[in-house]
Image (spheres, coloured by chain):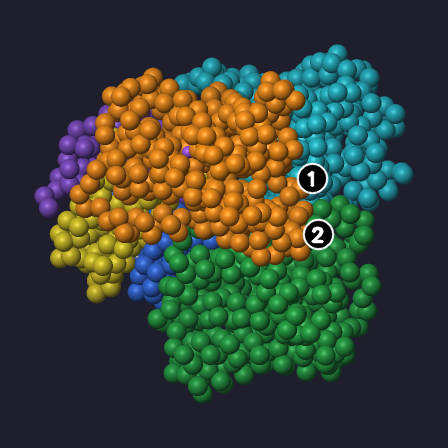
Chain colours: A cyan, B green, C orange, D yellow, E blue, F purple
Amino acid sequence: MGLFDLALTNLVSPPILFFALGLVAALIRSDLAVPEAVAKSLSIFLIMAIGFKGGVEMASASLSDAAMAIGAGILISFALPFISFGLLRATSRTGRVDAAAIAAHYGSISIVTFIAASDAGNAMGLAAAGFMVAVAAAMEAPAIFSGLILAGKQEGQSDRELFREVAVNGSIVLLVGAFLIGWATGETGREVVEPLFYDVFRGVLCIFLLDMGLVAGRGLVRQAGALQWPVILHGLYMPVIGASLGLFIAWIIGLAPGTGALLMTLSASASYIAVPAAMRLALPKAKPAVALTLSLGVTFPFNLVFGIPIYFAIARAVLG
Amino acid sequence: MGLFDLALTNLVSPPILFFALGLVAALIRSDLAVPEAVAKSLSIFLIMAIGFKGGVEMASASLSDAAMAIGAGILISFALPFISFGLLRATSRTGRVDAAAIAAHYGSISIVTFIAASDAGNAMGLAAAGFMVAVAAAMEAPAIFSGLILAGKQEGQSDRELFREVAVNGSIVLLVGAFLIGWATGETGREVVEPLFYDVFRGVLCIFLLDMGLVAGRGLVRQAGALQWPVILHGLYMPVIGASLGLFIAWIIGLAPGTGALLMTLSASASYIAVPAAMRLALPKAKPAVALTLSLGVTFPFNLVFGIPIYFAIARAVLG
Amino acid sequence: MGLFDLALTNLVSPPILFFALGLVAALIRSDLAVPEAVAKSLSIFLIMAIGFKGGVEMASASLSDAAMAIGAGILISFALPFISFGLLRATSRTGRVDAAAIAAHYGSISIVTFIAASDAGNAMGLAAAGFMVAVAAAMEAPAIFSGLILAGKQEGQSDRELFREVAVNGSIVLLVGAFLIGWATGETGREVVEPLFYDVFRGVLCIFLLDMGLVAGRGLVRQAGALQWPVILHGLYMPVIGASLGLFIAWIIGLAPGTGALLMTLSASASYIAVPAAMRLALPKAKPAVALTLSLGVTFPFNLVFGIPIYFAIARAVLG
Amino acid sequence: METTTKKRLEIVIEAPVLERLTRKLDALKLSGYTVMPAVSGRGRNGSWSRKGEISDSQRMFVLFAVLDEAALAKVLDEVYALVSSQIGIVTVSDVEVVRAERF
Amino acid sequence: METTTKKRLEIVIEAPVLERLTRKLDALKLSGYTVMPAVSGRGRNGSWSRKGEISDSQRMFVLFAVLDEAALAKVLDEVYALVSSQIGIVTVSDVEVVRAERF
Amino acid sequence: METTTKKRLEIVIEAPVLERLTRKLDALKLSGYTVMPAVSGRGRNGSWSRKGEISDSQRMFVLFAVLDEAALAKVLDEVYALVSSQIGIVTVSDVEVVRAERF
Ligand SMILES: Nc1ncnc2c1ncn2[C@@H]1O[C@H](COP(=O)(O)O)[C@@H](O)[C@H]1O
Ligand SMILES: Nc1ncnc2c1ncn2[C@@H]1O[C@H](COP(=O)(O)O)[C@@H](O)[C@H]1O
Ligand SMILES: Nc1ncnc2c1ncn2[C@@H]1O[C@H](COP(=O)(O)O)[C@@H](O)[C@H]1O
Ligand code: NA
Ligand code: NA
Ligand code: NA
């Protein structure tokens, strides 16, 4: 199956089409909305399931590979903000603190993008190693600290408190916890949750992506004016830069295609949950709307629709 | 299976019994309640699933039949309010604006009644054509405009704005969108969502109908006094009139029994989501409680428990 | 399989591990949380499913056994508070009204503990009689009245009103209603809801227990200081006393091992939904935090993790 | 636009008692009231939070009612009699309304 | 800390009209507003409750806006024109703010 | 029923900072406070809405605390120091309470 077919298969899959439906509904200002409490719970379910599945697959994984991939992920998450910051400052009139905040978003990851990519990978028969879940968890936080370095010392800011709040962030704790539970219970545990965590999973992903489309679209509608072109472009070329760095590292440490494609996706994705909240605490002067709209309204759709199939195609060609 | 058996089978099916349980719980003033956010999300799920399934079945449908059925549906939705209005004014002391508002409810449709009917039809081996989903979507709005005509010009009312708000109504957008996605992805897409949209569907319908019973019952308890007998009767004979008109049209355009039964059900059902909201904007002087209690507390239970099996039995006899 | 293996199998099952994950997340003060609306709905779903399943199994149950077990349950629920009250007053400095309120919690039951026990029983091949669902429902309320007796007359309290509010309590109505629906529809009804009420059930239980762990843990963190040691110990030995009484009665009326283990579990469990609410109405002077923290933070985890496997092992040895 | 002064009664009350309170307000023939949810708080009885709770026994609602000064005294007596023995607080403030006869 | 007196406009409005109301407030160039959910209530149009509702047509939201006395008159006229024909109420009260220029 | 005048401090604050705020209030030994959810709003930092949001970073909560005039000055200073650098507003108004010693 060539790149074009891959892209097409990805485009006409229900999850992507429901995301598009959400986008369209928001742009035509429909009042369609998944209640917040349920949207949050769907993401909890998806994180639980993806974490658990990753853990189950650890039975057939090498711990040294896992350790190496986790190390690589931390490195990427820490490094990307410096690239993002440099490019933003060079190409746009974004202030230092705002640029640092945006940069932190691009170093960190989007767990939903990761889930969609794993799902697409399985559909293409390019399953990834279970430890990529641990890599995803490990890549959430480091970028935040790069962001703080780039912003420079802020008065009245307590880093100790911040570290704690980020480390025990709900999605990290759940992802790691579910991963360990899947690892501990293996196939026996898998049988218990198979119908919900495996069979129903993709249908739930459709509903969740419908909501993501609605939220991303509403963000775009609300902020349309606020984003200057150099910043919008940043949201489009940063994933490409991230994916390239991810590919390079995957090639160095010798990851398999499916696994490498996920590392590319993680590097290409930008945070819109953990980092925005952390930035409000660490860099209150940074305008939250810009970074969030860029990450959720520009980069997320780009990765979901175009990025993922391309990353898999390239990973297969280069790492296959 | 005779009409009586049909009715019985329908009566002792879990979805109907859970609806009855909800009704009883509300009438004995139990505090049982499905949280609003989840109730809304269940309806989103049911609409997504029913829309998607209809789309998948379009593979085996004739577009000209679809077009004709949609046209017929629009006609019925537009016509019924005039009948409802005339009868209400003739038999009760309901004011002009209130009568117009109630009439609009009866021209439009109840998507949950439609879903319950499709489910019952499948259970009886009388599956309907996929395009009935499009018919359902097409029948939601026309009645609103008949209602406005019947109410006469209201000062300070912007019809343009109203048209937009109704057209992009969440449930219409979702129903049509899911329908198109099912149509576009067909059997391949069906496999992705089968466990959730097909297997789990009927169980979710049970939970949702439990909530519908609770809401309908609470409405009755709250409004018991407010409804005069001629109005309550209206809520009982309008579905019969609607179903008859639906049957007549179905016979003219030659719909199959299962498909015709759904057209009867749509015509017999009354709106309690799209229309009430539109009436608050278009006819603020109309008392919302009366129309809503009538549609949700009288007509909905009547259709769900007695109407649906009868419509299917008659459709089979007349259109079979 | 010996007691130790049983305990181990129970400990490393996904439901228990997700509960533990929730506890840990709360203790390390993670912001992980299942939205309230969804947590409530999951409990509604679990109660619906467990009630329905019990009803379906009534086909193969003896009504006289059922009647006897229900009578026994009512007796236990009524008796336990007197034991709890006496021990509390003797061992701690808890005031009369507070002790009466706590005692009522221990006479009543925890439906989630019951659900987890049924699930564990099925996993061990020790399924219970369907009527245990009716026993669970019957055991919720009697303890409340023992509590009122123990507290002595309170001024300005209307018992009649209270009786009504407890009798139509949401979870009782739903449990009994779903039980009757399962009984009425039997195998035909079972087919309708099988994928949701049976297959997906255990996965949902995992999500729900994750939330229970979070709530129990947060309660402990908040109330840590408020609980004196004699009271904490009460939360640990009361389940043992309750289970023993349950075992004795089960032996007298000759219940099968799986059924008897559930009666032990019900007797050992303490309420944290129906009773706390009733106590706020009946004994407003009683401090709610203590009883709730004890029941949810001490007794619930004890039963879930250690109690259940032990009760089943003993029931098998004594009643087998 | 000409306005009249009314009283705004605000009650924070624990969930299990809410229905009794509203029944009492109905009996007192109040022109109306609105109930709003609260998510967390702290008082003499310690702190509480809705996070993931499945029981309503430990939560608060905020009810406010705009009413006429004349009616206040009686309402306040009755309401206070109920709330004081429960978990919650009662406050009163001044508000201006446009159509006085409505309240 | 030195404070200035402003007006707090509080509007209880039925959900279907909320968007029109906020659009009007945006047009009036208000410095800001906050919308809060209500779960149940009673008024001339009878009582309502969110319990298990799936339709938004029968619910209320509570919107409040802190604004300058000077702006009040005009805002009140426009808001009242909209709300009076709908289900809802409007009240005004005094509040103190720290940074006056913000409102 | 005889009442006493107290101050009602109302704070609209962005979610990520709520916990820091309540910790500060606890440290200030306030007699109590209540936190309520908001669903949408607009301010200098633009408009926001909860519709379908999964992140809490862009939402507001409304916290109010009834306290004694004597305590107000200090509390206002500390609270304002925190809120002013964040997204949110602070207002103060007068309320009457029945049992003065409680607040
Ligand atoms: N006097 C009042 N105090 C507080 N809220 C009120 C009052 N009157 C009406 N409301 C609220 O406004 C809604 C609509 O009021 P109405 O238009 O009178 O039916 C009611 O359902 C209440 O939620
Ligand atoms: N004048 C106002 N009246 C009521 N709420 C306001 C006002 N200004 C701001 N807010 C609320 O406080 C939030 C943050 O305000 P700001 O810091 O100005 O962006 C807004 O999103 C509103 O929810
Ligand atoms: N001073 C206060 N200001 C605002 N809310 C309060 C105050 N005191 C108590 N509350 C609220 O009322 C609830 C019960 O208060 P209490 O009866 O003192 O425990 C608390 O949990 C708070 O939500
Ligand atoms: Na990244
Ligand atoms: Na109709
Ligand atoms: Na017990």
Per the rendering, the mark at residue D80 is none
C308 in relation to F93, above or below: above
Q: In what element is the residue under mark 2? A: helix
Q: Is residue B90 left or right of residue A294?
A: left
Quadrant assignment, res B177? bottom right
- Of the four image quadrants, the one with ligand 6 is top left
Chain letter belonging to callout 1: A
Residue at point 83%, 34% (across, down): A125
Tell me if I can see residue B290 in this picture. Answer: yes
Residue on which the image places disc 1: A195
Residue type, mark 1 in image: Pro
A112 in relation to C191, above or below: above
Chain letter belonging to callout 2: B
C262 in relation to B215, above or below: above
Q: In what element is the residue under mark 1? A: helix
Per the rendering, the mark at residue B198 is 2
F31 in relation to A9, above or below: above
Q: Same chain for labels 1 and 2? Say yes or no.
A: no
Quadrant assignment, res A43? top right
Residue at point 27%, 21% (across, down): C90
User: How many other residues sit within 10 Å of disc 2, few (<14), some (14-19) or many (≥20)?
Assistant: some
Q: Nearer the viewer, residue A96 or E80?
A: E80
